[in-house]
Image: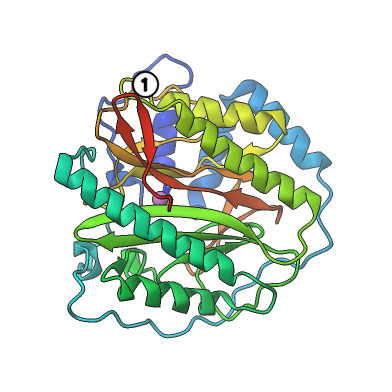
């Protein structure tokens, strides 16, 4: 599950593009969670004015883009009542708290026991995601996918991390077609030709494992298939450059270099994050070209979760305060892994 990059922090980060000012050495996640759609336009414009060539490319692509008329825009469906979790399953602290999550939290660096716990939660998240993917077919509702995911997670003694996170009402995020991320499972049935990102996070033995993938529903056209393929490649390539001492900004460069080859956009407002005992911890992982500071540490765990778009990278948030779609209705795809920095590279924890 992606963390939201607030306009305030966005502006701070943008100031680093020109090289004239340094970022605070530890700009933590505490401001990431109050996404304010009313101010996004200003921050995105600021960002664009400072990103030169990228700006030109994005604008040209947007004005040239012909709206896809083969499918209808995504609309909200009905959200079913919250599903119960058995009492014996431990909850993350944020579930009972009335205050929104996203307080200051340092990097997740683990000892041997912590690494084993991260492997276990990562493996379970991957198994649940794989199972959820097998359910994708025309006619199934995203609520039915939520039900299946919820059941499998609690059957394994884990808590579905999104449930109750900042008020999120369901156990998984299902983001269809132009939905960039944080789609709420509802009564909408999947249609032939849809793409759907399913984002699973489990809380097992005190540790979160976070992963997502984009699946094809029925017969998907080549344009969508290519976007999904390139998005997956961008994640795989980014993981391949990770190792102790590597700068985090190399992740953004690697992903954006790959997306640029295909003239796809990289969403900036939602970011990867440290993950472990805390769902969304430091550091912020930017998926676009940036000059952010910080290096990967041995035994550190975090997510990389690029969101690539065919058209606009600008997000619009629905009234539910969660669902984020592209402003022009063009397709968006996402993949996510939780990784562990090892002595000679990175281990993908969310695979089975
Ligand atoms: Co995530």
Q: What residue appears at the point 43 percent right and 61 percent down from the top-left corner?
A: 127
Q: What residue appears at the point 66 percent right and 44 percent down from the top-left corner?
A: 229
Q: Which residue is mark 1?
A: 246
Instruction: Report x, y in % for residue 119.
Output: 29, 49
Q: What residue appears at the point 84 percent right and 49 percent down from the top-left corner?
A: 66
Quarter of the image holding residue 345? top left
Residue 176 shown left or right of residue 244 in the figure = right
Please, is residue 19 above or below residue 90 in the view? Answer: above
Residue 288 shown left or right of residue 206 in the figure = right
Residue 161 shown left or right of residue 92 in the figure = right
Q: Which of 192/170 is in front?
A: 192
- Which quarter of the image is occupied by the N terminus? bottom left
Figure disc tally: 1
Instruction: Report x, y in % for residue 113.
Output: 15, 46
Dot 1 falls on a residue whose secondary structure is loop
Please, is residue 51 above or below residue 41 in the view? Answer: above
Q: Which of 217/251 is in front?
A: 217
Instruction: Report x, y in % for residue 188.
Output: 62, 78
Please, is residue 119 above or below residue 132 in the view? Answer: above
């Amino acid at each position: 599950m992606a963390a939201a990059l607030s306009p305030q922090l966005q502006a701070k980060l943008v100031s680093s593009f020109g090289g004239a000012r340094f970022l605070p050495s530890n700009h933590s996640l505490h401001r990431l969670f109050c996404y304010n759609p009313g101010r996004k336009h200003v921050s995105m414009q600021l960002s664009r004015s400072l990103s030169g060539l990228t700006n030109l490319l994005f604008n040209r692509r947007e004005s040239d883009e012909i709206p896809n008329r083969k499918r209808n825009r995504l609309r909200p469906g009905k959200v079913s009542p919250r599903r119960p979790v058995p009492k014996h399953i431990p909850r993350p602290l944020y579930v009972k708290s009335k205050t929104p999550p996203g307080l200051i939290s340092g990097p997740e660096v683990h000892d041997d026991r912590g690494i084993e716990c991260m492997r276990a939660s990562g493996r379970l998240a991957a198994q649940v995601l794989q199972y959820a993917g097998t359910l994708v077919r025309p006619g199934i509702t995203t609520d039915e996918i939520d039900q299946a995911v919820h059941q499998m997670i609690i059957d394994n003694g884990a808590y579905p991390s999104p449930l109750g996170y900042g008020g999120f009402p369901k156990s998984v995020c299902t983001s269809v077609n132009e939905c960039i991320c944080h789609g709420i499972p509802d009564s909408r049935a999947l249609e032939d030709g849809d793409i759907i990102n399913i984002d699973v996070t489990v809380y097992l033995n005190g540790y979160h494992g976070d992963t997502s993938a984009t699946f094809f529903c029925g017969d998907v056209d080549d344009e969508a298939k290519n976007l999904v393929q390139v998005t997956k490649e961008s994640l795989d390539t980014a993981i391949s450059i990770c190792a102790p001492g590597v700068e985090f900004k190399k992740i953004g460069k690697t992903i954006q270099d790959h997306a640029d080859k295909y003239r796809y956009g990289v969403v900036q407002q939602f970011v990867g994050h440290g993950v472990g005992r805390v769902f969304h911890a430091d550091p912020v992982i930017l998926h676009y070209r940036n000059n952010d500071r910080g290096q990967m540490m041995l035994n550190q765990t975090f997510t990389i979760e690029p969101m690539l778009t065919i058209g606009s990278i600008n997000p619009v948030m629905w009234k539910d305060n969660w669902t984020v779609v592209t402003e022009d209705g063009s397709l968006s795809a996402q993949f996510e892994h939780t990784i562990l920095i090892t002595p000679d590279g990175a281990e993908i924890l969310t695979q089975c």
